[in-house]
Amino acid sequence: MPRYQIITLVDITRTNPSRSETDHVKLSQQANFNSLIQAIGMRSNVTWDRDPVAKMGRVSDQDFKAMHWHWEFFVEREQVFLKDNDPVALLKTDLDGVPIVAGLGDSIELAPACFFSQGDRINTWIREIS
């Protein structure tokens, strides 16, 4: 199964709240994670063995430091996001502009409140890792 990595400035902490949960932050963090899963799930079933991990520091190969989340997942089919020799092109397109809840654990302003994986406002980086 192909494996992918997402690094994002969007708080995608998986909180798994119960139906009786009233904490707005926990509910919103889970909502962001659910939105990510749903965007990926438009093309393939998603599985993972570890929940997203929050880190403070330099963001991947970018020139700034911020709170960011690392998450790896699998899909069932090979090349499901492939377009024009980019193994994640279709996922970048699918995820770009998906609404999120901002102002959670993020350390920079996310406005407008969306995942951006293309263009000049990128806050989410995606790559195939195997």
Image (tube, rainbow, N blue to C red):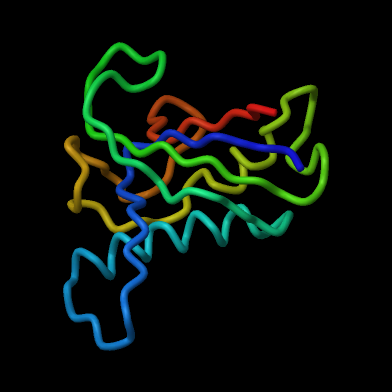
In x, y percent, where is residue 114?
38, 49
The answer to whether residue 88 is left or right of residue 121 is right
Quick one: quadrant of the C terminus?
top right
For the point 19% across and 35% down, the residue is: 108
The answer to whether residue 103 is left or right of residue 130 is left
The answer to whether residue 44 is left or right of residue 11 is right
**Residue 91 is drawn in which quadrant?**
top right
Quick one: quadrant of the N terminus?
top right
Q: Is residue 119 above or below residue 115?
A: above
Q: How many marks?
A: 0
Residue in front for this viewpoint, 123 or 128: 128
Q: Is residue 51 above or below residue 108?
A: below
**Residue 86 is drawn in which quadrant?**
top right
Q: Residue furthest right?
A: 78
Q: Residue furthest front?
A: 49
For the point 37% across and 65% down, the residue is: 31
**Residue 15 is drawn in which quadrant?**
bottom left
Residue in front for this viewpoint, 106 or 4: 4
Q: Is residue 11 above or below residue 82?
A: below
For the point 36% across and 15% down, the residue is: 62
